[in-house]
Image (cartoon, rainbow, N blue to C red):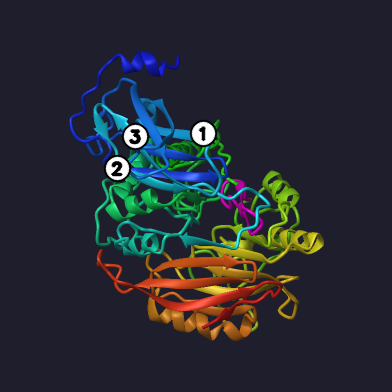
Amino acid sequence: MVPVSAQAVAEAPVKFADYPFKLGVASGDPLPDGLVIWTRLMPVPFDPNGAGTAPITVRWQVAEDEGFSEIAKSGAVIAYCENAHAVHVEVMGLRPERQYFYRFIAGGEESPKGRAFTLPEPGKHVEQFRFALASCQSFTDGYYAAYRDMIAADPRLIIHAGDYIYEQDWIGGMRRLPVPEALDLAGYRALYAAYKLDPLLQDAHAGAPWLSIWDDHEVENDWGGNFSQGGLDAEAFMRRKAAAFKARFEHMPVRLGTRPIKGKVQLYQRSVVGDLLQFDLLDCRQFRDNPACMGNPRTFRSFTEMCKQVTDGGRSMLGRQQESWLYRGLGIFGAKWNALVQTTLLSPFDFIAGDTGAYDMDGWDGYSASRQRLLDTIAAKKIANPVSLGGNIHAYYTGVIGRQAMDKGSKPLVSEVVGTSISSGGGGDDRHKNTLAQFGENPGSRFFENRKRGYVLCDVSHKRWDNQFRVIADVRDKNSKASTLATATIEDGIVDVNNS
């Protein structure tokens, strides 16, 4: 397709059937001098041609004040039907460590206002930084009251560790989805639209910039590489992944460089906050080898005894190219804290009492050699204050990971904090009781709570990293109040997590 210039499109007036900015606005991937702003024109929910089929000019403004009297940057971008009339603007030339406001204008209509923040310059001294960690927000399982509390806490950044959507309704739930299961581009677009119509999720996007990775449900439960847990043949699964990848790009505030090309996406990235924090965000799905030890399930889903395959040095959770990228850049900015943002529990965890074990083959335990290479690199490079951040397990978890991960007596090397789900179910009292009973066989474990939904509010200084486990009273109530269930602190230079 030949691109259409903004000037040419501007000459063709557009009139929408209804308000076009129903999905709100978002910002993401902040830098010291810029960030991404996003919106999608969708005047008629779930109608693929609701905004017409012609290219549409969308004007944008970034201002230093909420009243937009001091415009810092402005311009125009084209929204194309083949991209669901979504737009991504990479705004550059902004000032570091600043608050900005942004909006879009199309067809005489003005979008909601969004607020975003640029980051401090690398190496600049930063006393303290607040961010929030979220994951797993099944639309059908409940409401997003956690996001209301999150924005009220005023973080400068929101990190989402995956399962932004669920490809189908697993439980039946409280809220209905427009399709029973997404298998093609139209289905995934409809799911993203349903999620983004939620006003609390819109507020979370409009209130702070996001950094995000994906987990399995953005495509299919427990997928990885070319492995389809649903049993699709190679060609059908390739089509499904391509549809899921494109829909995600269209609906998230991410850079143009993450646009899917030939069925691949450059998702992993690095972000730095002055001299305080380095984030390495990982793609734990796209490049992994097929699951290990699947012949003898011990409990449910992918939990099984260890087999020789998990220690095969040729297997990888991240893929060799991503591993090389990660190892080259670990600690490269000399920050006080180095955070690995990945999708799940990095710690080994045995879920069955006794001499035999049951480990999650869909997680890092199924890629034990790959995890050990990561730990070896952290140790060899003497990375300062390594902290693993994750989601996926629908539970709060804290612990430490030993220098030799599978050696229960090994000296601690990495601290770990995992956040519970925004709304997805957590397994209830039985899971809580059984998991706590296993702590004695998992000496790196410090804290586990799966019965509450919420997020982690992180306050990081040069002396300590404080985590508040914020929980909502009732996921079924969109107006539910929030409180702090527990806190966890990691001190500078000490590999451990102290809970209270």
Task: Point out the frontmost of discs 2 and 1.
Answer: 2
Residue 372 appears in the figure: yes
Residue topped by disc 3: 104
What residue is at 52 percent from the left and 45 percent from the top? 29
In percent of width and height, residue 67 lies at 32, 42
Task: Point out the frontmost of discs 1 and 3.
Answer: 3
Residue topped by disc 1: 256
Q: Is label 3 in a helix, a strand or a loop?
A: strand
What residue is at 46 percent from the left and 36 percent from the top? 239
Residue 219 appears in the figure: no
Q: Which residues are magenta?
A: 269-288
Residue type for callout 1: Leu
In percent of width and height, residue 353 lies at 58, 83
Of 291 and 86, nearer the camera is 86
Q: Is label 1 in a helix, a strand or a loop?
A: helix
Give the mark nearer the N terminus: 2 vs 3.
Answer: 3
Is residue 465 depicted above or below 24 in this figure? below
Q: Is residue 312 left or right of residue 479?
A: right
Give the mark nearer the N terminus: 1 vs 3.
Answer: 3
Q: Is residue 269 left or right of residue 473?
A: right
Q: Are marks 2 and 3 in contact (CB under 8 Å)?
A: no
Numbered label attached to residue 352: none
Of 72 and 145, nearer the camera is 72
Q: Is label 2 in a helix, a strand or a loop?
A: loop
Query: Quadrant of the rendered structure where residue 170 is?
Result: bottom left
What residue is at 35 percent from the left and 52 percent from the top? 168
Residue topped by disc 2: 112
Q: CA distance from mark 2 to mark 3?
A: 8 Å
In magenta segment, residue 284:
yes
Judge the density around disc 2: few (<14), some (14-19), many (≥20) Cα neighbours within 10 Å: some
In magenta segment, residue 170:
no
Residue type for callout 3: Phe
